Image (cartoon, grey):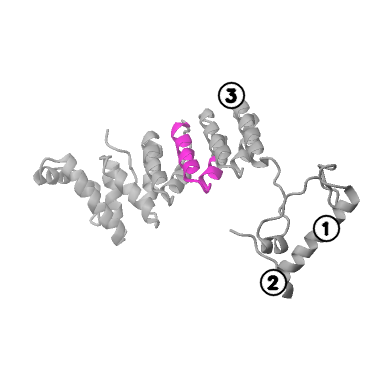
Amino acid sequence: MQPARLNRTGLEKNPILRVTCLGLAMAAGFVTVLLVTGSPESQPETRTALGNQNPTPAPADAEDATTSPARPVPAQSDKETSKDAWLNDLEALEFKPFDEVASQILKALQSKDREVRLRAVNLLIMSKDNASILPLLAVAQRDADGEVRRNALVVLENSQLKTNLTPYLLSGAADNDEDVRGSLVQTVWSLSPEQRDEFIGQAVYSSHPDVSSSAFEMLKHEYSKKTLDLLLNVYATNNVSQINNANDVMNSLLNQTFASASEASAWWQQHQADYRDDLSLNNDDLTPDP
């Protein structure tokens, strides 16, 4: 994008007058320099009135020369220097106890440089079963870059944490990036059955369509009494969208589990006493069959 030009003056609107005045000004300046410093051959380094040696030649375009402000020369790669310093610092933190380096990792997660943030979130993988990483993962899950958010889920997958991870899993399931949502599914399957059930039990009722769909899709691959109990409770909600998802899961499970409709009917005859007429559970015991 070109920088904004200054407002044109009456002089600039007249190209003939402008070029003529510019030529006269340049000629006058050249004569003044010769009078003060002598010929160019005797003084290879000329000075301007401000004392700067070897000034940058004016642009060839006369209009740019008269209307464009002077452009400052950028400092030598300040951004790259900062990134290199960050990466060196993070490398030095790799094998230190997390509690000693958490504040530095948090600052790196807030860096403007994507590579620095990626390196920072990857450092969290080294801090297994340490619940103190969760606030930092929450920062990473809000990152503008999809790869940073995906790597945050990979950290969860490898964390070996036993705590409730559902809030972080729900964030991944609702992500706008399809790759992040795909990573979420893989992460959920790597967790303990209790953590997985906790997530699915909340996610199926989510008003966010991607979250709910992910949970129902997982239920297609986990046939158990608990899965069936959850689906039947969904039927009792009168939520059309969720009931349609439950139908889809139920059909998939029937096709996977039973060789025929009669076999499925026999299973229901055996277990129907566990349910009320509205298909809700008779009790709160959701422990899967052994």
Is 144 a magenta residue?
A: yes
Q: Residues within 10 Å of mark 3 (few under 14, many from 20)?
A: few
The residue lying toward the viewer, choosing from 17 and 3, is: 17
| SS type, badge 3 | loop
- Identity of the amino acid at label 3? Phe
Examine the residues drawn in magenta and state their main secondary structure.
helix
The percent position of residue 135, horizontal first and vertical second, equals 57, 41
Residue that badge 1 annotates = 29
Q: Which residues are magenta?
A: 137-159
**Residue lying at 55% horizontally and 34% vertically, measured from the top left:** 119
Q: Residues within 10 Å of mark 2 (few under 14, many from 20)?
A: few
The residue lying toward the viewer, choosing from 60 and 247, is: 60
First in sequence, mark 1 or 2: give its number: 2
Looking at the image, do the residues carrying marks 3 and 2 touch, with CB atoms under 8 Å apart? no
Residue that badge 3 annotates = 95
The percent position of residue 32, horizontal first and vertical second, equals 87, 56
Q: Looking at this rendering, what residue extends furthest in the right direction?
A: 36
**Residue lying at 72% horizontally and 51% vertically, measured from the top left:** 57
- Identity of the amino acid at label 2? Ile
- Identity of the amino acid at label 1? Gly
On the image, which quarter does residue 7 sit in? bottom right
**Residue lying at 21% horizontally and 44% vertically, measured from the top left:** 253
Apparent side of residue 48 relative to residue 155 in the rendered image (left or right): right
Residue that badge 2 annotates = 16
**Which image quarter holds the N terminus?**
bottom right
The percent position of residue 69, horizontal first and vertical second, equals 72, 59
Q: Residues within 10 Å of mark 1 (few under 14, many from 20)?
A: few
